[in-house]
Image (cartoon, grey):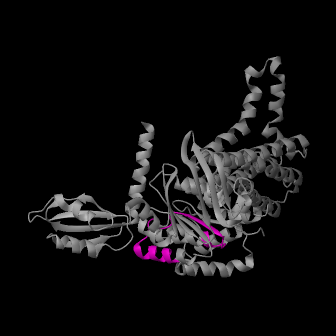
Amino acid sequence: MKHFLTILSHEIRMLLVSPGTYVAAVAFLAVMGFEFTRILDSYSQAPQDASPAGMFFAQFWLPVLFMVPLLTMKCLADERRLGTIETLLTTPVTTTEVVLGKYGAAYALYVGLWGSTAGFFFILRRFSSDARLFDLGPLIGGYLFIAVSGLLFVALGVFASSLARNQMVAAILTCVLLFAILFGGLYLSTAPWLKPEAFQPVREAVAYAQVFRHYEDFTRGVVDMRQLLFYLSGTVLALIFSILSVEGKILHS
Amino acid sequence: MPEPTPSAISVSHLVKTFAGVAAVNDISFSVARGEIIGFLGPNGAGKSTTMRILTGYLPATSGSVAICGFPVATQPEEIKRRIGYMPENNPLPEDMRVSEYLYYRGRLKELPRAKLGPRIDEVLEACDLKRVRHKIIGRLSKGYRQRVGIAEAILAEPPVIIMDEPTIGLDPHQILIVRDLIASLRGRMTVIISSHILPEIEMTCDRVLIINQGRIVAQGTPAELRAEILGRNAYTLELAGDFGALPGLLAGIGSPLHVASQGEPDPSGFRTVTLVTDAAGELGESLLGTLIGAGWRVRAISRSHPTLEDVFLAATRRSWDAVDTAKK
């Protein structure tokens, strides 16, 4: 793991000079800013059940769907397109270090961008007279959920990028994978063909993998070990598949 | 440090097949330390594949490769510390500055931070890149990019340097710079280069391997190859006389000379004749004396040195013939 930090710092640097990152950042902050304004607007008109933080983080799926592909599409696909993967892997680095370094950089940026939305809450706290609007519980739970689920989302992006040679293909593949994991559970839990008794274990598994359920638990302050394991094991699996995909494509090049 | 082994690179019975098609078919050779060796071969001959296997990037199907005594298959980490590799088409990141790129590569190659700065200055100087050190690689011209690739390959001062077509796309002046650069590595580093530009290989390399169809069809120094494949000397003459008596006349010279080709007579009766001999010595004088003594009219005589190009064409043709007969 000697080279992990070299690759990580290089990748963060490269992400910071890439226009794609800024497109992702501006789009993300604009969308989330408007969303936050809309939430505050609804509070000023009528009292609401949930806290602003809870409502704000409920929209996490929207930026995930466009931001994660923009951050991860380049990482391995571009190396393969340019052929620099060959020069990279003929230095004393291992494929694992390369994949982890790239993953680490994309994840750091993902968390950093979400972290910048803390400014919204700072402004809210600074200028609102009503202390009830600023509820720390859902806020911490929300950020924790973002950090934990981000592990898996970014890993899926890296995996998609390891499969493709073209950035656009990687981005679309990431979008599809993320959509499946976000909304696939919702669809399956209501699917009529899963109703029979025989499918009971499948239904249980689907219920366990409901990302929106996890989100609700986190913002209520319930941090379930099983949910953490769901994201961690998913992340590890996606990264192992990325490493295998990079190595496998060399063998069959 | 492991004890030094006599050969920097040794390859034995290397085979690589892609989906059943052999790209490299039972190649064996070894390269001594400090030697500069050239790989020649038509497109698709297996040059790049062999080089990739040498770097540990591609696994071999069978056979063994060792670099500085370390087998590539079982100790790829050791190999990767000992090679500088410039792949075909010289892939470089588009959006980095030259000095940044070299710094990053130096870190990956485990050069200590303190040494890296001076070493980068050295290679920039050696490759004449000082003026563009702060430019973005994606905006550099082909010649500069090529030299960035070479600078990167020699950056960590590895004992073995493998370059796949380092002079492709360079203008004559830049080729000269690269040639001098490679020549300056002679004795210190073992260099393998592949090229289509035959004079290039002839001038820089100590030894040449000609590969065709995944096999080595000829190897040796450029001079040895000429002797082996084409015969030692060739004379081209323009002469007029009784051509039927020419072989008999030539037999009288002493050294075996035979007619390799004979052109059509021009209006004044002169023909262009190429004579080949295996003898090493100079035959021009006795040849001329014999011809003129026999009343031949000689208009021109020249002793031609076969170029590596002729050797290459002859060697690859010979191997195609072998393949064709094997098919029948």
Q: Nearer the viewer, residue B253 or B207?
A: B253
User: Looking at this view, is B196 or B273 the one in front?
Assistant: B273
Q: Residue furthest left?
A: B267
Comparing A200 with B159, the one in front is B159
Vertical position of residue B237 compared to residue B66: above or below: below
Figure quadrant of residue B103: bottom right
The image shows residue A102 at horizontal and vertical percentages of 70, 57
The mark total stands at 0
Q: Nearer the viewer, residue A233 or B145?
A: B145
Left or right position of A53 against B150: right
Q: Is residue B194 above or below residue A161?
A: below
Q: Is residue A5 above or below residue A152?
A: below
Task: Tell me the quarter of the image containing the N terminus of chain B.
Answer: bottom right
The reply, left or right, for residue A52 in relation to residue B213 is: right
Q: Give the x, y percent position of residue B158.
A: 66, 70
Q: Position of residue B164 (x, y in %)?
A: 53, 62
Question: In the image, what residue occupies the spot 72% across and 36% down?
Answer: A183
In magenta stretch: residue A5? no
**Quarter in which the C terminus of chain B is drawn:** top left
Q: Residue at x 78, y 50 (%)?
A: A151
Q: Position of residue B98 (x, y in %)?
A: 58, 73
Residue A93 position (above or below residue B129): above
Residue B324 visible in the displayed image: yes
Q: Which residues are magenta?
A: B153-180
Is any atom of residue A25 visible in this view?
A: no
Does the magenta segment cover residue B156? yes
